[in-house]
Image: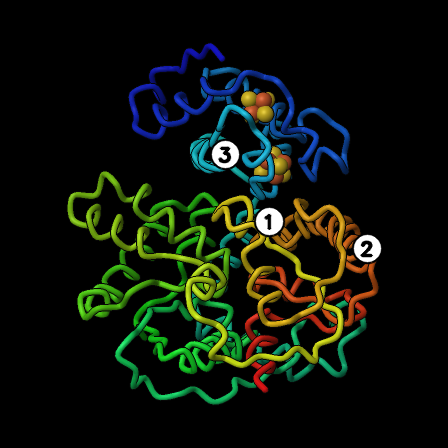
Amino acid sequence: MQTTLVSQFANTSEGQEAEAILRTCVHCGFCTATCPTYQELNDERDGPRGRIYLMKQFLEGGEVTEKTRHHLDRCLTCRSCETTCPSGVEYGRLVDISRGLLEQQLERTGKERLLRWGLRTVLPNRALFAFFLSIGQFFRPVLPEGLRTKVPPRRKAGSRPTASNNRMVLALAGCVQPSATPDTNAAAARVLDRLGISLIEAPEAGCCGAVNYHLSAHEAGLIAMRGNIDAWWPVIEAGAEAIVMTASGCGAMVQDYGHLLRQDPVYAARAKRVSELTTDLGAFLLKQDLSVLNLQSRAGKVAFHCPCTLQHAMKQNGVVEQVLRQAGVELAQTRDQHLCCGSAGTYSVLQPELSQRLLANKLEALTVDNPDRIVTANVGCQLHLETRAQVPVQHWIELLDTLQR
Ligand code: SF4
Ligand code: SF4
């Protein structure tokens, strides 16, 4: 694709990166076939190729209107189009850059700004999110049905082994997970401990930066990333062999630290090292000898929902399924595995109507084989799916933790 960016963008590193990505697109349109919003809305501007044209038009100095942003806002950033694209177009980076630049040019309404500010203030702040969640959980029994399902029930974390093994890995507690699904990392710690590996969480590490970064507050996202690098570095120097991610949304973000901080004179080298060390929990377990866990499935039929961040961003499609099969789990048949559930970070709040349509489609696709439960690998998907699922939804590591003979 030929491009001529206006000097305002052409002279910046983000503009140059966007231009290089735009030039790899050959307009073939293969990506539209696997785009969830195009499938739902049947409008070229709600598919990847159409959005690429809209971004190109904006970066070349063409007119941008609320309509332009409307179609970019409706993109889930699921990156299903990246998996399909034969030309290797890095659509996720392009849309992140374009949204950030657009945000500086086209002011949002007061209501939109307030909602985005609220999300950026509460979600990445572990204590603040836990506070609001506890209020919601207290009133949950008396909330109307529609609202009640949106508040995750109170859950307890199981016991955590003391970190006494020679081998150790880092894990990120994150922002939402410790209060919404506190047993996820505890279950990971128990499973890893049985393999002779200690799971360490650096207490100063916080949100991975994705909430701010994907809401176009790039600098705030980068600050969170630098903070995590500082928190992890002493444990890395002490010999942590990997940074094992239990939420693929965070995993995808941390794997990008190296790229996003590549021009930072202080953090570039450490960010690169952090990204190299980052892996999904499933991929890490698959390299271990799982036979010592002596697992036996009593779980019935299990449907696995592979988050977009795991399959399209981290490129780990099929890995968790392999772990579950090794554990003797009977996997249910599912359809449309490549399609997003509609959670997509803050998308379910910002685009509720479309998000609910995608959720209904996803639950139908996950339950065609009448599973007894659904498991997934990302806290956002887990909480979103359970709002309307008719069977229990949990993180797959919680299930694995219960399968020891
Ligand atoms: S599949 Fe790739 S090259 Fe083809 S239109 Fe989509 S983004 Fe462009
Ligand atoms: S990221 Fe997902 S929703 Fe956005 S254009 Fe690509 S496939 Fe469509």
Instruction: Say what amino acid the circle numbered 2 marks.
Output: Glu
Left or right? Give the position of 149 relative to 323.
right
Contact? badges 2 and 3 (CB < 8 Å): no
Q: Position of residue 354 (x, y in %)?
A: 73, 46
Q: Name the residue under label 2.
A: 364
SS assignment at label 1 = helix
Find out if the beta carbon at label 2 lies less than 8 Å from the nearest ligand 2 atom: no
Q: How far apart are marks 2 and 1 (CA)?
A: 34 Å
Contact? badges 2 and 1 (CB < 8 Å): no
Instruction: Say what amino acid the circle numbered 1 marks.
Output: Lys
Left or right? Give the position of 350 relative to 191.
right
Q: Distance between the residues labelled 2 and 3?
A: 29 Å
Left or right? Give the position of 283 relative to 394.
left
| Residue occupying image coordinates x 16% and y 43% | 265
Q: In which quarter of the image is ligand 1?
A: top right
Find out if the beta carbon at label 1 lies less than 8 Å from the nearest ligand 2 atom: no
Q: Where is residue 324 in the image (x, y as percent from the top left)?
A: 60, 66
Left or right? Give the position of 21 relative to 50.
left
Vertical comparison of 391 with 59: above or below: below
Q: Mark 3, residues whose alpha carbon is within 10 Å: few (<14), some, or many (≥20)?
A: many
| Residue occupying image coordinates x 65% and y 74% | 152
Between residues 142 and 204, which one lies in front from this camera angle?
A: 204
Between residues 34 and 217, which one lies in front from this camera angle?
A: 34
Q: In this rendering, which labeled residue sits more in front, label 1 or label 3? A: 3
Q: Name the residue under label 1.
A: 111
Q: Name the residue under label 3.
A: 95
Q: Where is residue 232 in the image (x, y as percent from the top left)?
A: 26, 65
Q: Position of residue 37 (x, y in %)?
A: 70, 38
Q: Mark 1, residues whose alpha carbon is within 10 Å: few (<14), some, or many (≥20)?
A: few
| Residue occupying image coordinates x 76% and y 56% | 333
Q: Which numbered disc, 1 or 3, marks the residue that appears first in the sequence?
A: 3
